[in-house]
Each structure stands twice: as structure tokens, then as C-alpha cells.
Image: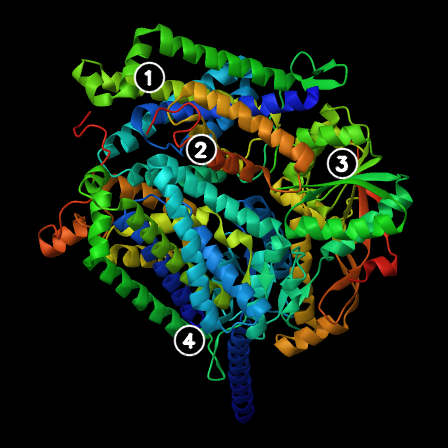
């Protein structure tokens, strides 16, 4: 099978991994349900596209700029999350996804329905980074993102987020500034989604609003949940599984949505912690015991069999 | 102008009808039942199937409702109830997965093409000076009213309805008081799914089309409506449905170039939530 | 005895030679008879699955017919169909698969603009010919010389519509209902340009999203403005609802649409009586007497039990062009591209292509069809060269 094909798949898998890890910061670490993550994927992509095409930034300047802008807007959502909680927040994030895509679609500044084309590959010391080298670039950023998540999880911030996730009222009561940390979580998660967006834009070199719609957000959430929410290996393996699997199942392509939906239903029903999560079957088999305490069970409706 | 008001009411009624089932499920199980849209679509297909063989609208409605009740009950029994003890995001994703699965199932079983659902009623339309209301639209209004009145009656005037209200307020306490939770949950899903079925049939007749993707817009737009009205509040949902229906009508008629209709529902929702985080009629969070 | 010996030897020699020749020919033929692989990309799953199915069936029927008649110069065609899932990322993956995995001679797109554009880029980079059926975004062919499009550009069709409205429909004022995707907007742009140029007045222009079902609010507004004509750039389902709801509201204006409405199942059946009288710009003439078109229309209906539509017909032509090119010049990419560039007057199912522009766009007449008696019938043709120039 050709190099172009493999590097293409690899690039997409890498971008999905970054997206899933970034969502994991918001939903996994901080426990805030976000169903509109694709919007920030889009913000990163469009920002970088416009900065490089209209303002003349180089890729290397546009990338951090796009991340900052995506993170900034993400912080805005974080502020909204202070006011609107729980399931209301979940639906609000869906709404934000729709509104942002609408902005892309209905304003000529963003190219409208035609999208933006002619985005260039990045240049390094006069050399065009494309194909295999681009894959390496993406891989580099995957490692950066994963490392960042690792640092977060082991740090002060990670501890604070975990506390908020487990029991927000108790966290508040013990003096923790929940607001600050929620906003930080959203900012970080959205910034990295923006990073994924930049990588996507300069690979596809042609973006349309259709690439960042609600179904894409669902795909990212599904990868996170199927892989194992709250861990680092979960999002990585979940993204790998769900991005690479369609390729192996191409002969069954007519039934792919059936499988995709079925996989999600099956996984959430029988292995809610994800395939590679805390109490996962695979983990238990490999290690003979749980790796960490069970994941969050807040807001439960009764604790027993009904 | 009167025609626009009529338009808004028709649209709003359909929204209210579909959304009520959703809010009922949320009220009891605190789950965002996205797969409700799949029940809605299955209602349309079942109704078409029955109507094709019997040419009776009544039979189509009844059998679709029965079929969907079973479907809804199956979802609840095998997917939601076992997941009640998990983190909030899990049943939500499960529901999404189920919806995706069902949408493709409809395509595989029924074909991707649009099917016409032609029902001729005994009159074509009512014309009131300049305002037109088609027979199908009348059917929607009557159907919606009938369903909502029935729901009101069931919830507020029956014993089971009382149990429903108790469970919606606090499931643990209700259980401690001796309420048969299982029965309430089943009852809830049967009513919600039946209403979805009726909504599906009425929608299909009104637009003369049944197609596998007819559930994608209701799937997420209903959430905007349900949240706007206040999750779990039936009167809130009905009000929200009508409000959004009118808002979309006015926007389309006078400002159509600013934003697409779907964005209207969500924008309105976000706006209201900023001022009232529990939705219009929701209880404080 | 000696004579016998010689004859025997002769026979033996001859038979050995004959046998040898047969073996060589058989082996040679097996090598030469390697199938010619052509890739097809279509949205088989997802929101456009109906179009995907129409495209797949049309192309499969074409390949079957050609193979039954002996293939291309003796070689059978192998059509490799991929689902792009209505997703640009998948289109890129699928393009790579076709080029590197299956090593196709050429690719055909039976898909929308954004997916076609993504795939076209890959084909262009790998210097493999790519023939596009019905995607109308200008960016699709912008990539370079390896991409060709057999359908008319959106704004060209729109221009034709504008001319038809002004010259053939006897109207003075128009309300526009514009679908907000690239298809809808490019058509609208062309229409407005020519309609206004020829003296029509656009009294309103409203946008809507693909999949919209409720047009009563905007139609009520239009009813008040009382235009002579309503022009929409919708796809079959939405268009059918526009017409139906307009009829319900008692709107008397004439109706006009585009090839987006060119579907019997999706449009005519849903719109019913309300579709009577609408004129559309398209490239499939149901009343055509051209044999190739008739053969397609009748053959498709006979084989699949449903009437074909524009997406299937356009992609059929995209594939047929590739096949004809291969027939003429073989499987070398450069030669195929040259064949396209220098081709003149190619007759396809969807009309006669006069020629290709340097950009890979076609110049061909725009058909006009009207719905009479519940069917698409011939209404007219726009051949004005100024209109047809992309």
C-alpha cells in the first residue's frame, strides 16, 4: 500500500489524537461536558488559514497565534460554563458549535459556503514540509500534546480539576477557586483543538464549514469515551482505533455507520470506562487489577439496580 | 400578519410535540435522549407502512404509536437503565451512538430515497381572507392539542401521573415512599415514544416525505427547545416550542439572509440561558 | 513410407507449432487482458446517500454494458467504487487508495464539490486524470490540468436560467430562493447577473439551508410581493417542498429551478401536482431523441426500476468520457489529458460537449425542461455562446 495513503491516514489519526486529548482536558480532567469541540478545531483552522493567506504570517507564527485565539474564545466558553451548568452546558456547547459554524458559513470574510482554498504547506528553511515530513510534524505535536496532558494531570492544576470533577460543591467549600480552574481547563483544551485545526488546514489546504460541524464533535467525544475518558492512553488509543478502523473495514463500507453507532452503543453499555480506561476488561486482564480508583460517579440517580 | 402567525404556530406545534417526549424522559431519567429522534423517524416509517396497506390514517397513527412504544421501551430497558449509575456523559453518548446506528438502519432497510406519504383528507385547505391553512396543518394542530391535553390529563389527574411527578422531583425519595419506579419509567417511555410516533406520522404527511435523514435536524434542535423551556418542564417545553417556531418564522420572513434557521434556535437558547440558566420554566439548578 | 514419414512429421510439426501458437496467444491474451481499472468516488453513506446510489448504479450499468460488448479494445474495465462518506478527509484517503493501492488509470467523481475538490488535489499531485461529474465549485478544476469537469459551472447555468427567464418565460419580476451552499450561491450569482442585464427586476433574494423543510414564512413574504417568477436553487426534496407550500399558499407566480431539481423520485413524486409547469435548467433532456441518451434513460429504468436523475447521468458521462479517451489513446495519463483537451463535439447522455476550456471546463448547451403531466419534457435550449463561456 502506497506511502501517500499511509502518511495520509497517519496524519489524520495524529490530528484526531490531538483533538481527543484536548477534549479530555475539558471533559475528562475537569468533568465539563463539551459537545461542540469541533468549533475550536475550526477556529484554529480558519485563523491559521486567514493569517497565512491574508496577513502574510508564516506557518510558524500563525500556529501559536491560532492556538492563542482558540484558547481565548475557549476561555469565553469557560466563563459561560460558570453560569450554565451540567446538561444545560452540554446543550449550550452544541449551540456554540452551530453558531460558530454559521459564522464561518454566512460571512464572506471566512469564505462563506465556498470555504478557503489555497492554503500552503509550511516552509522550513526554504524547504516545503509536506507528506512524510508533515506526518512527522504532526507526530511531534501529538507527543507535545500528550506530554502537556501528562504534566497537567500530575500538577497542581490537574489536582484542582480532579477535585472539581469529583465534587464541585466540596471543592468550592474547601476554598478552591473553581471558576478560575474551569476557565483554564476550557482555555487549554480549546487551544489544543486549535492546534489540531492548524495542522488540518495546512494539510488539506482547503477548508469548508462542513469540516467542523456537530457530527465531528460527536466523533471526538466518541473517541474519548470509547478509548477511556480521563486517561491519556484512552484518547490516544480511542482515536487510533476509530480513525484507523474504517480503513480495515472498507469492504464493509456500506455498513460503516451501523458499526460506528453499534460500537459506541456497545462500548458505553458494557465498558463505560472505555476500552483502555480504568476498570477496563483489557486492563484487568493484562494487569490483574484496577489501575486507579474508579472514575467519577457524581450526580448519580440512585446507586442501585432499579 | 395572520398567515405568518399561523405558520409559526404550525411549526411550533410540531416542535413542541417532538420535544415533549424528550423532556419527559429527561424529567425522570436525567438523560438527554437523542435517540428520541430515531423513534420519531421510525414512527414515520411505521405509519407509512401501515397506511400503505390499510389506507387508514387512524390505524397508521395507532400502530405507529404501539410500535414506537415497544422501541422506546427496548431502548430504556437495555441501554438507559443499566447506565443510570454511570457518569453523565455515558448515556448521552450511548444515545448518540444508537441514533447514528438507527439512521443508517433506516437507510439500509428502507433505501436512501425519499418516499412520498400522501394522505388525502376530506378537505384541501381552509382559506380565511388571505390566510391559508391546509388540511394537513389542521391535523397537526389538532393532533398536537390532543396529545398535549392527554399528557396533562395523565400526569395531573391519574395516580400514575402523581407517581410520575414524584419521581421527576426526586427518584430516591419517591422510591423510599413506595413508588413503583420501574412502572413509572415504563409508563414514561411509552407515552413519550407514542407522542414521537404521532409527531413522526404528522410530520411525514405534512411534508409528503419519509426519508432516513428526517431525524437529523430534530435530533439537535429539540435540545435547544427542551433546554430553553427548562429541562424536565413540560409546560416550559411547549412554550419554548411555540416561541422558537414563531422566532424562526419571523426571522425567515423578514431577516432570512442573516442566519440559517437552526442557528436561531440555538442562539435564542444561549441568550435566554445567560439570563436564566435554568431555562424559562426550569427549576433552579 | 518415406512420404508418410514426412507427412507425419509435417503434421506433428504443424500441430506442435499450432499448439505452441495457441499457448502463446492464450498466455499473451491473459497478460494483455488485464482489466483497466477506473476508480469511482461517491457519497454512498451519509446525507447524500441517495445521490451516491444513483451514481453507483449508473456507472455500474455503463461498465457492464461496455464489458458485455467486449470492453475497451478487448480489455475489460474494472470499476472500483469507494464511499467518500460525504467527508473531505475520506475523499483524500480514498483518492490515495485508488491511486496507490489500486493503481487506477483514472478517477471519476460522482460526489459533491468539497469532496471532489479534496480528491482532485491528490489526483493532480500524482498526475492521474480525474473526471468530475456534477460538482460545480470552481476550485475543483483550479488545481491543474489533470482535472476535468463534464458539467456546466454553477454560474454558467445560472446565467442560462436568467436568459431563459427573460426571453422565454415572459416575466418581469423575480423572487429568488437561494440555497446557501456553493451550488446554490453560484447559480444565484449567474442568474442575477443575466436577469438584471436583460431587464428583469429581482424583488427579493432569500437564503435557506440545505435540508430546510419549512418555507411558508418566506413564501408568505414573497406572496405579498407578488413577483411573476420564483427562482430557486434547491435540491430535489427542498425544491419539492418549496413548490408544494407555494401552491398551498395560493401563490400564482411561475416557478423556475435548476438541475438540482432534476430527479423524478426526489422531486416530482414529493411535489406532486404542485410541480406542474416549473421550468428547470439542466443537462438531461427526457425527450431527447439522441440514441445514447435514450439508451441510458430506458436502460436505467429497466434495470433498476426507478427513473435516473441528474447526478447519475452526469457521472455516467464523466466515466464514459474517460472510457472513450482510453479507447482512443490508451492508458497513458498524458495522452488521456491531451485527448480531453483536443476533443470537440463529444456526445454524451447529458448533451454535446462543444469543447473544453484550458481550465478543464466544458462549453455545452444548457437544456431547459418543463414539467408537464407529471413528467419532465423538453422546453428549450440555451446556446448563446456568451452565456456558455465559463
* Location of residue B223 by image quarter: top left
Q: Distance between the residues labelled 1 and 4?
A: 58 Å
> Is residue A44 in view?
yes
Mark 2 = which residue? B275
Q: Is residue C183 above or below residue A119?
A: above
User: Considering the numbered disc 3 on the image, is that residue within a helix, a strand or a loop?
Assistant: strand
Q: Distance between the residues labelled 2 and 4?
A: 50 Å
Q: In the shown orientation, is residue C20 left or right of residue C108?
A: left
Q: How far apart are marks 3 and 2 (CA)?
A: 54 Å
* Location of residue B247 by image quarter: top right
> Is residue C78 in view?
no
Instruction: Give the residue furthest to the left.
Output: A288
- Sequence-wise, the earlier of marks 1 and 2 is 1
Mark 4 = which residue? A132
Q: Nearer the viewer, mark 2 or mark 4?
A: 2
Q: Distance between the residues labelled 1 and 3?
A: 49 Å
Amino acid at each position: 500500500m502506497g506511502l501517500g495513503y499511509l502518511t495520509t491516514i497517519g496524519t489524520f489519526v495524529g490530528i484526531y489524537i490531538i483533538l481527543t486529548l484536548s477534549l479530555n482536558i475539558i471533559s475528562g480532567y475537569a468533568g465539563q461536558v463539551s459537545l461542540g469541540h469541533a468549533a475550536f478545531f475550526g477556529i484554529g483552522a480558519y485563523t491559521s488559514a486567514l493569517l497565512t493567506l491574508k496577513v502574510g504570517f508564516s506557518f510558524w507564527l500563525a500556529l501559536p497565534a491560532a492556538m492563542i485565539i482558540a484558547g481565548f474564545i475557549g476561555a469565553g466558553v469557560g466563563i459561560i460554563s460558570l453560569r450554565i451548568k451540567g446538561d444545560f452546558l452540554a446543550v449550550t456547547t452544541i449551540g456554540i458549535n452551530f453558531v460558530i459554524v454559521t459564522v464561518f458559513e454566512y460571512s464572506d470574510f471566512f469564505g462563506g459556503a465556498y470555504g478557503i482554498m489555497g492554503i500552503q504547506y509550511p516552509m522550513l528553511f526554504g524547504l516545503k514540509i509536506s507528506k512524510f515530513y508533515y506526518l512527522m510534524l504532526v507526530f511531534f505535536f501529538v507527543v507535545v500534546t500528550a506530554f502537556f496532558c501528562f504534566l497537567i494531570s500530575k500538577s497542581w492544576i490537574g489536582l484542582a480539576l480532579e477535585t472539581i470533577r469529583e465534587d464541585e460543591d466540596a471543592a468550592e467549600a474547601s476554598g478552591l477557586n473553581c471558576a478560575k480552574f474551569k476557565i483554564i481547563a476550557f482555555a487549554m483544551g480549546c487551544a489544543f483543538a486549535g492546534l489540531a485545526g492548524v495542522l488540518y488546514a495546512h494539510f488539506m489546504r482547503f477548508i469548508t464549514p462542513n469540516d467542523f460541524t456537530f457530527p465531528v464533535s460527536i466523533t471526538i467525544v466518541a473517541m474519548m469515551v470509547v478509548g477511556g475518558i480521563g486517561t491519556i492512553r484512552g484518547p490516544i488509543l480511542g482515536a487510533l482505533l476509530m480513525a484507523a478502523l474504517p480503513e480495515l473495514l472498507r469492504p464493509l463500507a456500506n455498513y460503516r455507520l451501523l458499526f460506528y453507532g453499534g460500537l459506541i452503543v456497545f462500548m458505553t453499555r458494557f465498558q463505560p470506562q472505555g476500552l483502555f480506561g480504568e476498570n477496563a476488561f483489557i486492563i484487568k486482564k493484562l494487569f490483574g487489577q484496577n489501575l486507579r480508583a474508579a472514575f467519577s460517579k457524581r450526580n448519580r440517580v440512585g446507586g442501585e439496580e432499579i | 400578519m395572520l398567515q405568518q402567525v399561523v405558520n409559526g404556530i404550525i411549526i411550533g406545534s410540531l416542535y413542541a410535540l417532538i420535544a415533549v417526549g424528550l423532556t419527559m424522559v429527561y424529567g425522570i431519567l436525567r438523560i438527554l435522549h437523542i435517540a428520541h429522534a430515531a423513534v420519531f423517524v421510525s414512527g414515520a416509517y411505521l405509519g407509512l407502512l401501515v397506511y400503505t396497506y390499510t389506507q387508514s390514517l387512524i390505524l397508521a397513527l395507532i400502530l405507529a404509536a404501539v410500535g414506537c412504544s415497544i422501541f422506546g421501551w427496548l431502548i430504556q430497558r437495555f441501554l438507559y437503565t443499566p447506565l443510570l449509575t454511570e457518569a453523565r456523559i455515558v448515556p448521552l453518548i450511548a444515545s448518540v451512538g444508537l441514533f447514528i446506528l438507527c439512521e443508517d438502519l433506516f437507510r439500509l432497510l428502507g433505501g436512501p430515497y425519499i418516499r412520498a406519504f400522501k394522505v388525502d383528507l376530506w378537505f384541501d385547505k381552509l382559506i380565511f381572507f388571505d390566510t391559508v391553512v391546509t388540511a394537513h396543518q389542521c391535523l397537526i394542530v389538532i393532533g398536537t392539542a390532543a396529545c398535549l391535553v392527554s399528557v396533562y390529563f395523565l400526569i395531573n389527574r391519574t395516580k400514575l401521573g402523581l407517581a410520575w411527578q414524584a419521581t421527576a422531583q426526586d427518584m430516591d425519595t419517591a422510591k423510599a415512599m413506595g413508588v413503583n419506579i420501574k412502572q413509572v419509567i415504563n409508563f414514561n417511555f411509552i407515552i413519550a415514544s407514542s407522542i414521537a410516533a404521532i409527531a413522526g406520522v404528522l410530520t411525514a404527511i405534512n411534508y409528503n416525505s419519509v426519508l432516513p435523514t428526517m431525524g437529523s435536524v430534530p435530533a439537535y434542535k429539540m435540545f435547544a427547545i427542551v433546554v430553553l423551556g427548562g429541562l424536565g418542564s413540560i409546560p416550559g417545553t411547549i412554550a419554548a416550542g411555540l416561541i422558537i417556531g414563531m422566532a424562526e418564522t419571523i426571522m425567515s420572513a423578514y431577516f432570512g439572509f442573516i442566519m440559517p434557521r437552526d442557528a436561531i434556535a440555538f442562539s435564542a437558547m444561549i441568550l435566554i440561558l445567560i439570563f436564566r440558566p435554568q431555562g424559562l420554566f426550569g427549576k433552579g439548578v | 513410407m518415406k512420404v508418410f514419414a514426412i507427412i507425419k512429421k509435417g503434421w506433428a510439426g504443424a500441430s506442435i507449432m499450432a499448439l505452441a501458437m495457441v499457448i502463446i496467444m492464450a498466455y499473451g491474451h491473459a497478460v494483455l487482458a488485464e482489466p483497466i481499472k477506473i476508480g469511482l468516488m461517491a457519497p454512498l453513506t451519509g446525507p447524500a446517500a441517495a445521490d451516491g446510489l444513483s451514481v453507483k448504479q449508473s456507472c455500474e450499468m455503463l461498465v457492464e454494458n461496455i464489458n458485455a460488448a467486449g470492453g475497451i479494445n478487448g480489455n475489460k474495465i474494472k470499476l472500483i467504487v469507494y464511499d467518500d462518506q460525504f467527508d473531505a478527509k475520506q475523499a483524500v484517503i480514498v483518492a490515495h487508495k485508488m491511486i496507490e493501492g489500486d493503481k487506477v488509470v483514472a478517477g471519476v467523481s460522482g460526489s459533491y464539490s468539497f469532496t471532489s475538490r479534496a480528491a482532485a488535489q491528490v489526483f493532480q499531485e500524482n498526475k492521474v486524470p480525474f473526471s468530475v461529474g456534477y460538482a460545480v465549485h470552481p476550485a475543483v478544476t483550479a488545481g491543474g490540468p489533470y482535472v476535468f469537469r463534464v458539467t456546466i459551472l454553477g454560474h454558467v447555468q445560472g446565467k442560462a436560467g436568467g436568459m431563459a427567464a427573460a426571453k422565454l418565460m415572459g416575466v418581469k419580476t423575480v423572487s429568488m430562493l437561494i440555497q446557501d451552499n456553493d451550488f446554490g450561491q453560484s447559480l444565484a450569482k449567474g442568474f442575477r447577473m443575466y436577469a438584471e442585464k436583460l431587464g428583469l427586476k429581482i424583488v427579493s433574494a432569500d437564503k435557506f439551508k440545505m435540508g430546510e423543510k419549512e418555507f411558508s414564512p418566506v413564501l408568505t413574504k414573497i406572496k405579498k410581493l407578488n413577483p411573476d417568477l420564483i427562482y430557486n436553487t434547491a435540491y430535489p426534496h427542498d425544491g419539492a417542498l418549496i413548490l408544494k407550500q407555494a401552491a398551498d399558499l395560493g401563490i400564482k407566480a411561475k416557478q423556475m429551478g435548476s438541475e438540482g431539481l432534476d430527479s423524478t423520485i426526489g422531486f416530482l413524486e414529493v411535489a406532486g401536482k404542485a410541480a406542474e409547469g416549473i421550468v428547470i435548467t439542466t443537462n438531461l433532456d427526457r425527450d431527447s431523441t439522441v440514441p445514447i441518451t435514450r439508451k441510458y434513460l430506458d436502460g436505467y429504468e429497466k434495470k433498476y426500476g426507478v427513473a435516473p436523475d441528474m447526478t447519475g447521468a452526469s457521472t455516467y458521462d464523466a466515466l464514459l468520457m474517460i472510457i472513450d479517451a482510453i479507447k482512443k489513446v490508451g492508458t497513458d495519463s498524458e495522452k488521456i489529458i491531451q485527448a480531453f483537451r483536443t476533443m470537440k463535439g463529444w456526445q454524451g447522455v447529458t448533451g454535446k460537449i462543444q469543447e473544453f476550456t484550458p481550465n478543464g471546463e466544458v462549453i455545452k448547451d444548457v437544456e431547459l425542461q418543463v414539467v408537464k403531466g407529471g413528467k419532465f419534457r423538453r422546453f428549450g435550449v440555451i446556446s448563446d455562446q456568451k452565456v456558455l463561456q465559463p
